[in-house]
Image: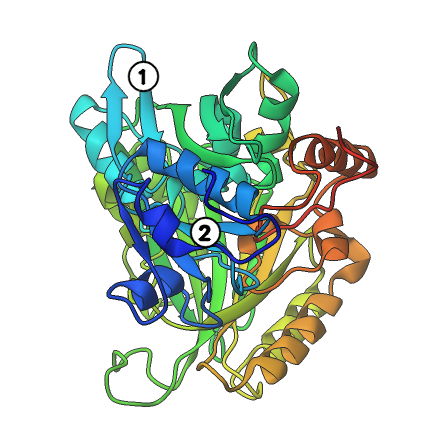
Amino acid sequence: MTDTTKNAEPKPDALRRHVRGRAITPGGNGYDGSTTGFQLLEPHRPTVVVEAAEESDVRTAVEFAAHSGTRLAVQATGHGRGAALCGGVLLDTHRISGVRVDPKARTAWVEAGADWQRVIEAAAPHGLAPLSGSFPGVGAVSYTLGGGVGLLARRHGFAADHVRRLDLVTPDGIHRRVSAHEEPELFWGVRGGGGNFGVVTGMEIALLPVRRIYGGGLFFDLARVPEVLRAWRDWTDTVPEEMTSAATMLPYPDVPGVPEVLRGRHVAQLRFSYLGSAEDGERLVEPLRGLGAPLRDTLRELPYSESGTVFDEPDQPHGYRGGNLLIDGADDRELSDLVELAGPSAPVMCVTGIRHLGGALARQPEVPNAVGHRVAGFSLGVLSPVEPGAGEDKARKRHDEVLALFEGRAHGHSLNFSYGPLEPERVRTAFAPAAYRRLAELKAYYDPDGMLHTNHPIPPLGNGR
């Protein structure tokens, strides 16, 4: 592209002549939808959006940004968007969303903009399932690049552990095939290091022979059953790797529209996904049922295609902020303080979740990757719905107070459960020092000028090339 100017804002008219998709400028049809996505807070505000229609548009957008001397961000669903891009090029990949399943090899080829629901639906007729997350509407590629802790995690590990190969375009405009045998150092870093090194156009992942799970939730009123978190914590020491579970605390407002049984209560939701028979699942969960009559009991055997009902998370776009820690555990006092700090008296609504880790998550895959802190026993996250332009400072302050309860037990942060801008120092805590240095060296080699605007920024180390 010879009609762009180095170190200047991109000229959209030049870009329009080179893409099959659309190049959208502010005020244009589709600009607001592409720049916002699922997360309504702080949308991107680029000079131009490239709504890619095919893989070649990705390379064109990367080359255009490089030749213009401007930054480029990528967005598919927009669930985990951090700091907004102002100016530059936003690459919207949601239209590149194909999924091809090879049932004999038990693999799927997943294009850049596909969400997990598409992968689940493509795999289910063959009796197969991906290592998808608790919400099927999340983009599969971005989820996987950040690690990916899903419903089958304790038995099968991180989603990143099951990537066979990736195709990506690096900031120099080169389309690279990356695997354990082709550019192995880049293969290590992309799986767990996020989108710092290039734009993924597709990935091949292993699928698992899973048709059904035993899953759902038990809902308890924390005022009536205050010991529920302690009981669940103790229970996690007794379960096999086939059981993946989480505890979520949520104060429900006393307003119309909230189910009457939950209205005005601070509720602990215990969520379960078990790879085994319904009979064995019932037996494993029985000690927790014995805590008292739950407000709700949604446990059942279900097809994996309905796995999104286990956590039953909101599916409508909204604004939110959140943070997390990877921790060893929690004692009784810490759990009590957590319930108090994040309860109905908090200045903002806090949805607090603890996910049980361990099992296969603690083991390196056959081909090691950059996912950090595998020894953590739990992940702790706190999230608040926030209206655009209001409440962010209150939410951040309370989140910091909640997470501070567990700083003495913390290994670091998890990239995928960070909802908001992340400074590099916080990203650094997601990895061991040697791994972080290795990632920074990769960044220096593939993106020495920091062209890529990412949710989890890793600054380049040294002089790059």
Viewer-side residue, 369 vs 407: 369
- Asked whether residue 180 appears in the rendered view, the answer is yes
| Earlier-in-chain disc, 1 versus 2 | 1
Viewer-side residue, 355 vs 90: 90
Q: Where is residue 321 shown, x and y percent of the image? A: 53, 70
Q: Where is residue 28 shown, x and y percent of the image? A: 28, 67
Quarter of the image with the C terminus is: top right
Left or right of 420 in this view: 370:
right
Q: Residue furthest front?
A: 3
Give amino acid for label 1.
Answer: Arg
Quick check: marks 1 and 2 in contact, CB under 8 Å?
no
Give amino acid for label 2.
Answer: Pro
Left or right of 357 in this view: 325:
right
Q: Mark 1 or mark 2: which is in front?
A: 1
Quarter of the image with the N terminus is: top left
Q: Where is residue 88 shown, x and y percent of the image? A: 51, 57
Viewer-side residue, 303 vs 90: 90
Q: Is residue 8 above or below residue 392?
A: above
Q: How many marks?
A: 2
Residue 120's quadrant in the figure?
top left
- Dot 2: element: helix
Q: Is residue 70 above or below residue 103?
A: below
The residue that label 1 is drawn on is 106
Query: Badge 2 local density, few (<14 within 10 Å), some, or many (20+)?
Result: few
The residue that label 2 is drawn on is 287
User: Image point 80% across, 36% down: which residue?
Assistant: 437
Left or right of 368 in this view: 255:
left
Query: Badge 1 local density, few (<14 within 10 Å), some, or many (20+)?
Result: some
Q: Where is residue 319 shown, x and y percent of the image? A: 43, 73
Q: Residue furthest left?
A: 125
Q: Is residue 252 above or below residue 53?
A: below
